[in-house]
Image (cartoon, rainbow, N blue to C red):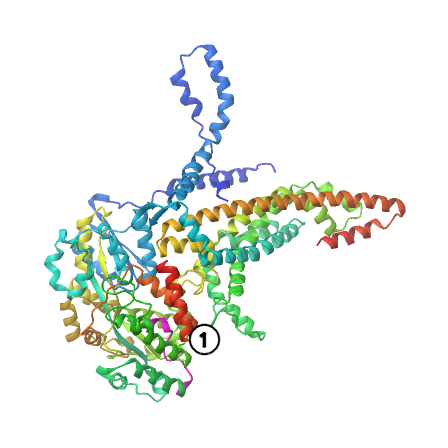
């Protein structure tokens, strides 16, 4: 083929492009500082409600530019953080850490700035005690500003309840589940009633219900001393039995978590109840909207939780030692975790504050949430937060949750195993993946 | 594929650089220099590739071996030297063998149909079509789409509850298929993504080779009475043998390293490790789990090396096999044409028919 002028031009263009690609390939990273402006990067996940706060901070602090990156789920944020920690570079100036994988982070706490150097001790009294303790390592270093905690209430679909002859009003629903004495037995009993009346599932999938049960215990997959605590744990085994019974009775909709058939399952009445930590409210809202629903879909939020107070998740903002602007980063993280900003974040996306003042504010003047049928979510969560104390999370907690019990519970949901087989499957996986 | 694009042009400043430093040398030295230039320059010109390869290919390879011989945690870093313990642990791990099975299953389901269809498409495109460029660009279009986007779209299409594929199957009365739970179904789904992306690309490479075949070969074959099938198997395939081998080898390497598709096919379940029960966890995905999920870098490095050895071995087998098949074909053709020559002598006129039959036998 002879070279026409056009092919020559094309070849030259192609060559230039590939050289340009090579040249730009390695130029990412490094906080740009044009005209003395400091660029702070921050990595968050899920729905943390910070977006408007960034703008406010930039306005109040000239010379600071915030570049935010939000990762869809805590699990993916974990992968992101671990990979960058291992690589020794790439972490943002401020990194959000989730409770589920805090255990691994605490093992390398020296990779994060000791925030006592930036005056976190003066703010110690702001938070509920255990939130502060969780990020204090054996040497007394404190590596995170607590943002939210995860007290759990019960989301339910009022329309579905009504159709099944159950009360719709959120106070009557709280009463129905047993109010202060709500138990899992009652929860499953009601589920069976509902299932008989409608033929539909009661909850979305067993994983989240199991998660709530485990988080409620004083000690979960690990003892407080950090020993694995699964095999021969009668409390866990008993609860697993309830779940197995529930799944066999058709109470689980066997959904894939974080997908829920593209949110449609929230809208088409596939299931009627859902365990809701504060931060989950934002997720539920997003899913309902993705599935084509809105406030009229009927989801509501009741001040009750089976088995008593429970905490699921919660986060901190930390500053890795690799940050070039540790002081400014710590200032931003500290500001974002102040009571006032926690209230604003809650109103934007639903994560429940970890500071005492913010909790009190929400308890007294929380506004009704239109999306959840006008439920006063702030007041309800403040009520649900009473008696909540996060349990110790070991280094492999999230692996046990997702990859040991995840597949076992899924085989229950899909009717591929009975309770004993699924429990055995979980133990086998535990030995293969964690104990080794 | 990287090797074809990462070979930058040789730096042109080599000769100028040498001149000023050695400008005062006498003539004999210059002559020696000249000879040196002739001998060494070619190596200098190709050196950028090899230097790049040493830095970003060879070094990681050796370093991975170093890591694999140690206890090595993702976050805590290097631990004690443990020899081949990591390799023993991996080889005794049922999830490793599961991942090998999945990899080969997906590889066979993708590469075999992919190359067969690519050959067919190339043969069709090699005909005198109208709007040639349009057709050629069309088959390449899927290749332009990023694998992640492909995975997201296909993962939605293969949704179990309301996915497009299950809905279509429902129209003709087939029950919904558990694309994300059934092992074989999930392999088919992932192979579909891979095929969708790579078939057109391979077809274009094969087409380029086919275009280089002298047309008069076809003309004389046609005059001799060879049908189009016969011409395809007796002229086209043997003529593009080197390219075909290249396509098969690259497809093998790519096929054994599938990652993005299974990683994102069911990203929500069990942390995206390739299905809740690892129904479609490929070896690279397992490597990723070991390194970044279970944080065992040592074993992950061991998996990487085992996979490397496996790919090299498999690539070699494939190379030898495809060479044998192609040359075996040549031998068979020689034998057959000998026989035919005899037959031709016995009775004229039957040649064309025999050729047709032969062609069908092969296809």
Q: Is residue B146 visible?
A: no
**Residue furthest to the left:** A122
- Tell me if residue A326 comes above or below residue A260 in the rendering: above
In x, y percent, where is residue A187?
31, 82
Secondary structure category for the residue under label 1? loop
Q: Quadrant of the C terminus of chain B?
A: bottom right
Q: Foreground: B150 or A91? A: A91
Above/below status of A1 relative to A109: above
Residue B303 placed where, x, y %? 44, 50
Most foreground residue, B11 or A425: A425
Residue pointed to by mark 1: A415
- Magenta region, residue range: A197-208
Q: Nearer the viewer, residue B34 or B274?
A: B274
Number of on-image labels? 1
Q: Is residue B191 left or right of residue A41?
A: right
Query: Residue shown at 78%/46% (left/top)?
Result: B336
Q: Position of residue A249 (x, y in %)?
A: 41, 81
């Amino acid at each position: 083929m002879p070279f026409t002028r056009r092919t020559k031009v094309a070849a030259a263009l192609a060559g230039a492009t590939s050289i340009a690609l090579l040249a730009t390939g390695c130029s990412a990273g490094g906080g740009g500082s044009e005209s003395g402006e400091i660029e702070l990067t921050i990595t968050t996940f899920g729905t943390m409600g910070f977006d408007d706060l960034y703008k406010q901070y930039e306005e109040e602090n000239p010379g600071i530019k915030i570049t935010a990156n939000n990762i869809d789920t805590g699990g993916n944020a974990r992968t992101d953080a671990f990979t960058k920690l291992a690589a020794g570079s790439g972490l943002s100036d401020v990194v959000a850490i989730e409770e589920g994988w805090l255990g691994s982070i605490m093992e390398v706490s020296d990779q994060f700035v000791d925030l006592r150097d930036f005056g976190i001790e003066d703010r110690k009294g702001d938070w509920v005690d255990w939130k502060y303790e969780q990020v204090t390592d054996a040497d007394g270093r404190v590596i995170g500003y607590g943002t939210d905690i995860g007290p759990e209430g019960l989301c339910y679909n009022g329309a579905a309840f009504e159709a099944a002859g159950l009360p719709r009003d959120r106070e009557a629903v709280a009463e129905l589940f047993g109010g202060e004495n709500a138990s899992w037995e009652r929860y499953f009993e009601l589920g069976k009633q509902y299932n008989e009346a409608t033929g539909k599932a009661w909850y979305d999938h067993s994983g989240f219900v199991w998660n709530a049960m485990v988080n409620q215990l004083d000690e979960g997959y690990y003892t407080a001393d950090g020993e694995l605590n699964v095999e021969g744990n009668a409390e866990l085994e008993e609860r697993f039995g309830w779940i197995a019974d529930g799944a066999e009775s058709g109470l689980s909709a066997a959904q894939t978590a974080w997908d829920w058939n593209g949110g449609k399952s929230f809208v088409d009445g596939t299931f009627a109840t859902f365990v809701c930590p504060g931060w989950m409210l934002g997720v539920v809202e997003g899913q309902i909207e993705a599935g084509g629903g809105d406030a009229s879909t009927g989801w509501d939020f009741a001040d009750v939780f089976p088995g008593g107070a429970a905490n699921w998740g919660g986060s901190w903002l930390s500053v890795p030692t690799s940050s070039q602007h540790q002081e400014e980063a710590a200032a931003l993280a500290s500001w974002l975790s102040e009571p006032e900003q926690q209230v604003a974040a809650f109103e934007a996306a639903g994560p429940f504050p970890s500071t005492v003042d913010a909790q009190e504010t929400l308890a007294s003047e929380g506004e009704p949430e239109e999306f959840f049928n006008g439920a006063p979510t702030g007041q309800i969560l403040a009520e649900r937060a009473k008696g909540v104390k996060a349990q110790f999370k070991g280094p492999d907690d999230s692996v046990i949750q997702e990859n040991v019990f995840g597949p076992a519970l899924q085989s229950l949901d899909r009717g591929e195993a009975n309770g004993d087989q699924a429990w055995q499957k979980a133990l086998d996986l535990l030995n293969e993946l964690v104990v080794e | 594929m990287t090797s074809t694009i990462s070979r930058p042009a040789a730096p042109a400043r080599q000769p100028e650089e040498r001149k000023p430093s050695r400008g005062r040398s006498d003539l004999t030295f210059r002559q020696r220099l000249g000879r040196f230039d002739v001998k060494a320059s070619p190596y200098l010109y190709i050196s950028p590739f090899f230097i790049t390869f040493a830095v970003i290919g060879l070094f990681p390879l050796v370093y991975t071996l170093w890591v694999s011989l140690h206890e090595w945690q993702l976050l805590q870093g290097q631990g004690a030297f443990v020899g081949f313990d990591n390799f023993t642990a991996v080889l005794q791990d049922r999830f490793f063998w599961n991942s090998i099975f999945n990899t080969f299953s997906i590889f066979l389901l993708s590469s075999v149909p992919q190359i067969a269809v690519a050959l067919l498409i190339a043969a069709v495109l090699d005909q005198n079509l109208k709007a040639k460029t349009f057709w050629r660009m069309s088959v390449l279009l899927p290749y332009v789409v990023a694998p992640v986007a492909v995975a997201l779209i296909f993962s939605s299409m293969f949704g179990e509850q309301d996915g497009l594929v299950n809905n279509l199957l429902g129209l003709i009365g087939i029950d919904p298929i558990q694309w994300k739970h059934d092992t074989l179904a999930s392999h088919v789904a992932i192979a579909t993504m891979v095929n969708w992306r790579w078939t057109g690309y391979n077809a274009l490479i094969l087409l380029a080779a086919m275009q280089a075949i002298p047309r008069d070969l076809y003309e004389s074959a046609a005059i001799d009475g060879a049908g189009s099938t016969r011409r395809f198997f007796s002229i086209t395939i043997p003529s593009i043998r080197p390219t075909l081998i290249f396509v098969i080898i690259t497809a093998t390497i790519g096929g054994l390293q599938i990652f993005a598709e299974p990683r994102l096919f069911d990203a929500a379940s069990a942390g995206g490790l390739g299905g809740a029960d690892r129904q479609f966890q490929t070896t690279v995905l397992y490597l990723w789990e070991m390194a970044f999920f279970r944080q065992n870098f040592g074993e992950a490095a061991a998996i990487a090396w085992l996979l490397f050895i496996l790919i090299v071995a498999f690539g070699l087998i494939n190379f030898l096999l495809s060479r044998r098949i192609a040359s075996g074909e040549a031998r068979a053709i020689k034998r057959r044409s000998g026989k035919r020559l005899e037959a031709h002598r016995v009775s004229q006129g039957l040649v064309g028919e025999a050729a047709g039959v032969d062609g069908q036998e092969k296809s």
